[in-house]
């Protein structure tokens, strides 16, 4: 937690004086001059009248006081959640989806029958797909594979065409969602990337709308504003207006997940730098043009476990059906709001809905698999049978067999038939496990026409799989089998090699597959040994 070059009235951690905007990084002044004074802020007195389209149900989201969280975390201030999941498409990004489309129409850029293309983590895509469905545009969305299936299903239902890209791809890599969108834009006539990362309509939607609503709802008093940083439009646009109206009386806290590099000073990003993280919709491996980091007083690095547990806590205690990035913002807000006094107000943006994470953070099993356990909201299932403390190594594990990702579906089917298996791990050219191909997955894709017998098995991967080690208990394995039909048994292997740079030796740790265990393997072990007088039972 480090305070940036702007001062604030509330106490804060070590200052980062001396931080300067990186070369090419734009100030919010580059877009704020384009504001038309347009605002969505209208005090609703009673039920609203009939709406011509659902796009009119974007904005004017409720501000809800979180009194139970205030009490639990010992806060003296008033803690408020700006519930953006009440927008028509379920997230704060509906605001920018509508704004960017309407601005493009007004400028003459978008014409009937045109195609909108956007690289996104999902929510902006839904906002654009919603606007496209209403206005009659074609819509193509490029998004990384880590994004939830729920987002994909909503996008497909809205008529969008989906392209998935590798999660690990850097933003400027040829196979990233951003690069793919640019290629499609070059190939498809009359297509447009509205580009949330640079489009002034992104922050302006919040400068003209979100900020005005917050000021009206709080009576013009906002002592602390907390929001996650992704493209930066939400926090930059809202903070710009709040700073203009309130000056340094309002402290702006930007929340950036560990693994992202948006926070300043840059040393804050050292932990898990450019590593993977679970929370969706915030954080990046580059600095978007619309993010004005000078508007942010304090940067806080959020943790996946705390974020997901806070999401579940808000659902359970406050009844706020919010998503994972909401948990990230609130988990940091309850820390920083401790600096506020009685009568002061802290406003936290909750960007999206739990609808996007029904099979992820809303699932206890998923939370347990990720290690997001607090033994309160989320508790591991405990097995007490004689077998529960035995080890995976006690099972009879078959000799491991793997195939490379370029093997054809026909070849994989022949292999499974000849070897008597119904699944086999798939590795890339480096020997790293990238998934499992199963009879069921290949059958479903072949019958639906989503692959052919000559397709590579990489098109039929079952990527939701669990790994266990030989030393793990059978009780832990049984917990996995509650929701997964199999697990890969993996062993860490250390590889020493000559260091071509320093002339010495280097050591790398590689994970190799020792075998696959399924439910039937565990059942066989228990039923064979769970008899009177069994030596294993003793």
Image (spheres, rainbow, N blue to C red):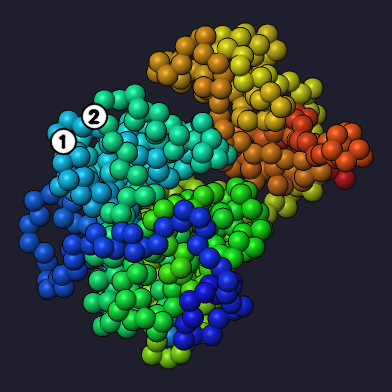
Q: Secondary structure at mark 2?
A: loop
Picture coordinates of residue 331, whole percent (x, y): 52, 68
Please name the residue that numbered disc 1 is placed on.
111
Q: Nearer the viewer, residue 180 or 186?
A: 186
Picture coordinates of residue 101, whole percent (x, y): 22, 46
The circle drawn on residue 190 is 2
Compared with 326, 97 (above or below) is above
Locate the C terminus by quadrant: top right
Return the residue found at the far right: 504
Return the residue found at the far bottom: 342
Q: Nearer the viewer, residue 189 or 148?
A: 189
Compared with 270, 443 (above or below) is above
Picture coordinates of residue 96, whole percent (x, y): 29, 53
What distance separates the C-alpha of mark 2 from that of mark 1? 9 Å
Q: Residue at x 27, y 76 (%)?
A: 215
Q: Secondary structure at mark 1?
A: loop
Locate the N terminus by quadrant: bottom right
Dots 2 and 1: beta carbons under 8 Å?
A: yes
- Left or right: 40 in relation to 445: left
| Residue neighbourhood size for the residue with mark 2, other residues' Cα within 10 Å, grouped as few (<14), some (14–19), many (≥20) | some
| Residue neighbourhood size for the residue with mark 1, other residues' Cα within 10 Å, grouped as few (<14), some (14–19), many (≥20) | some
Mark 2 or mark 1: which comes first in sequence? 1
């Amino acid at each position: 937690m480090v305070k940036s070059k702007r001062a604030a009235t509330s106490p804060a951690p070590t200052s980062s004086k001396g931080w300067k905007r990186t070369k090419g990084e734009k100030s919010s002044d580059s877009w704020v001059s384009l504001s038309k004074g347009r605002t969505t802020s209208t005090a609703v007195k009673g039920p609203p009248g009939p709406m011509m389209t659902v796009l009119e149900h974007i904005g004017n989201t409720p501000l809800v006081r979180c009194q139970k969280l205030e009490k639990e975390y010992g806060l003296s201030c008033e803690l408020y959640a700006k519930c953006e999941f009440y927008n028509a498409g379920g997230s704060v990004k509906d605001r920018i989806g509508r704004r960017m489309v309407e601005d493009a129409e007004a400028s003459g850029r978008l014409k009937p029958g045109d195609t909108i293309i956007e690289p996104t983590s999902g929510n902006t895509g839904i906002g654009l797909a919603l606007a496209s469905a209403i206005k009659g545009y074609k819509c193509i969305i490029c998004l990384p594979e880590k994004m939830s299936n729920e987002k994909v299903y909503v996008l497909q239902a809205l008529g969008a065409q989906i392209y998935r890209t590798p999660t690990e791809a850097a933003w400027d890599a040829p196979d990233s969602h951003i690069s793919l969108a640019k290629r499609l834009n070059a190939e498809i006539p009359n297509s447009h990337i509205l580009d949330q990362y640079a489009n002034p309509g992104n922050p302006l939607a919040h400068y003209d709308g979100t900020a005005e609503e917050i000021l009206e709802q709080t009576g013009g008093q906002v002592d602390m504003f907390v929001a996650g940083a992704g493209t930066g439009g939400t926090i930059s646009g809202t903070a710009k207006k709040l700073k203009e109206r309130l000056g340094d009386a309002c402290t702006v806290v930007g929340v950036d997940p560990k693994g992202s590099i948006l926070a300043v000073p840059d040393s804050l990003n050292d932990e898990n730098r450019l590593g993977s993280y679970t929370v969706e919709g915030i954080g990046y491996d580059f600095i978007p043009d619309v993010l004005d980091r000078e508007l942010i007083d304090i940067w806080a690095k959020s943790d996946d476990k705390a974020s997901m547990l806070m999401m579940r806590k808000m659902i359970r205690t406050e009844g706020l059906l919010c998503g994972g990035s909401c948990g990230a913002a609130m988990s940091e807000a309850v820390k920083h709001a401790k600096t506020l006094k009685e009568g002061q107000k802290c406003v936290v943006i909750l960007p999206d809905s739990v609808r996007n994470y029904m099979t992820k953070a809303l699932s206890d099993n998923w939370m347990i698999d990720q290690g997001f356990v607090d033994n309160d909201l989320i508790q591991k299932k405990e097995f007490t049978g004689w077998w529960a403390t035995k080890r995976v190594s006690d099972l009879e594990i078959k000799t491991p067999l793997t195939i490379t990702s370029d093997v054809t579906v026909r070849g994989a089917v022949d292999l499974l038939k000849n070897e008597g298996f119904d699944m086999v791990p798939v590795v890339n050219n480096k020997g790293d496990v990238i998934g499992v191909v199963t009879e069921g997955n290949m059958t479903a894709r072949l019958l639906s026409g989503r692959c052919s017998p000559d397709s590579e098995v990489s098109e039929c991967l079952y990527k939701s799989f669990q790994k266990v080690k030989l030393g793990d208990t059978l009780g832990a394995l049984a917990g996995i089998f509650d929701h997964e039909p199999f697990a890969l048994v993996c062993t860490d292997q250390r590889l020493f090699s000559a260091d071509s740079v320093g002339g010495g030796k280097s050591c790398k740790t590689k994970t190799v597959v020792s075998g696959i265990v399924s439910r039937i393997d565990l059942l066989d072990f228990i039923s064979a040994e769970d008899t009177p007088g069994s030596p294993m039972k003793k």
